[in-house]
Image: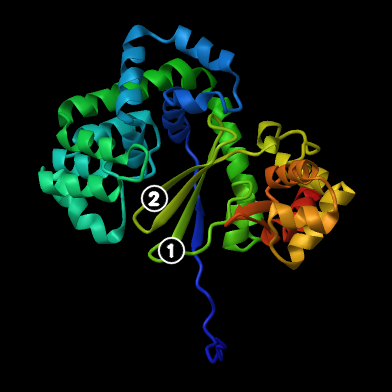
Amino acid sequence: MEVLNLTSRKRETYKVDLKYSVLWECALGIAAITNTPLMKTMEKPADYWKEIKESLPVKLLVELDYVENKNTWKSLLQLLHQRDFTDLKEFTHYIQGLSMPHFTFICLPFIGNSYQGLRRNASLGDPLAMKEMMKITKDNSFFPSYIEFICQANGKRLKEHLIQVMTGWYEAVIMQDVEQVHTILQNDYEMKQKMADKMTAEELVEWTTGGITYLPELNVSHVLLIPQYIYRPWNIEADLEDTKVFYYPIANESLTPNDPYTPDNFLVLKHKALGDEVRLRIVKLLYEQDFTLQDLTEQLNIGKSTIHHHLKILRAAKLVEINDAKYTLKRKSLSMLSKELEFYLNQ
């Protein structure tokens, strides 16, 4: 169907905010060490996590087991988003001062503006509201059980648990390197702030997260970008009222701020991916239209396993993605290459 466009209205997008805090790094560290299935995929080696666990006091290990069983790291992140806390003392004091219904409401996940009343009722102890929230979130890997736990938990005990695990992890793991961690996070934050003036909001999100294409959606007017080191190379995505959150992995340059010659890892991967004749042919084909693996094999007259290998490299560099069984060129990621290179050369 043909459409005659008579409007001058531009497509609305979101506003990007950047924040950083050692407290988020602390909460994400708790999340990381209690995510056993994902731990082997993280950048830090298995020995790192093993040494930490062996060094922790028994009391803290008990609280971490509770985190792993009940996913209470989610509560910590929800609470940290309530205000910009200056230090751990202010954060724990804030938790202690919350009324139980408000505390429960904050800990429950945001599942959409239209369900805020349901979330409020669940926080007040309505079992039907709790069950409805569980039903709505049934496709999430842990939300239903987490919602049930939060609604039925002893609020006083949960507060104590969150304060103990946050304080224990901070003192045992974060405190000894707190200045270094703060500096690394600050370096990345400042680098992204500089780049924010040279990119659109959507380009900034894609560049910062290493390739996530996040298009504007209804009822989301802000995207919050928070740097983290502990969960590299993973991005962690979350939803808040009016806001999409990405806890993104810091760039390599942030680890060596005094060495201007350290390039961003994704900048290197992109140029390596493009430094091959076959892959450049694939990029040009995908620039023209989306193709299946079989289509590309026929177009290039090259073995399927070879094409798949090249596509894997292009995907790792966040230049290509799969949509509905077809390979698609991430045009924005490709077009940002010159800006990324210019930023690196002038830093």
In this rendering, the answer to whether 223 lies above or below 142 is below
**Counting other residues with Cα less than 10 Å from the Cα at mark 1, is it few (<14), some (14-19), or many (20 or more)?**
some
103 to the left or right of 304: left
Residue 267 seen: no
Q: Name the kind of residue labelled 2 in the image.
A: Asp
Q: Nearer the viewer, mark 2 or mark 1?
A: 2
Task: List x then y, in percent, for residue 228.
Answer: 53, 36
Q: Residue at x 35, y 46 (%)?
A: 139
Identify the element where label 2 is drawn.
Answer: strand
Task: List x then y, in percent, for residue 24.
Answer: 44, 35
In this rendering, the answer to whether 253 lies above or below 43 is below
Q: Nearer the viewer, residue 6 or 248?
A: 6
Residue 178 seen: yes
Q: Nearer the viewer, residue 75 or 129?
A: 129
On the rendered image, what quadrant is the N terminus found in? bottom right
Task: List x then y, in percent, for residue 85.
Answer: 37, 39
119 to the left or right of 57: left
Label whose residue precedes the other's in the sequence (2 or 1): 1
**Counting other residues with Cα less than 10 Å from the Cα at mark 2, is it few (<14), some (14-19), or many (20 or more)?**
some
Mark 2 touching mark 1, by CB under 8 A?
A: no
Residue 40 appears in which quarter of the rendering?
A: top right
Q: Name the kind of residue labelled 1 in the image.
A: Ser
Residue pointed to by mark 1: 221
Residue pointed to by mark 2: 239
Q: Residue at x 43, y 63 (%)?
A: 221
Q: Residue at x 61, y 38 (%)?
A: 250
In this rendering, the answer to whether 115 lies above or below 94 is below
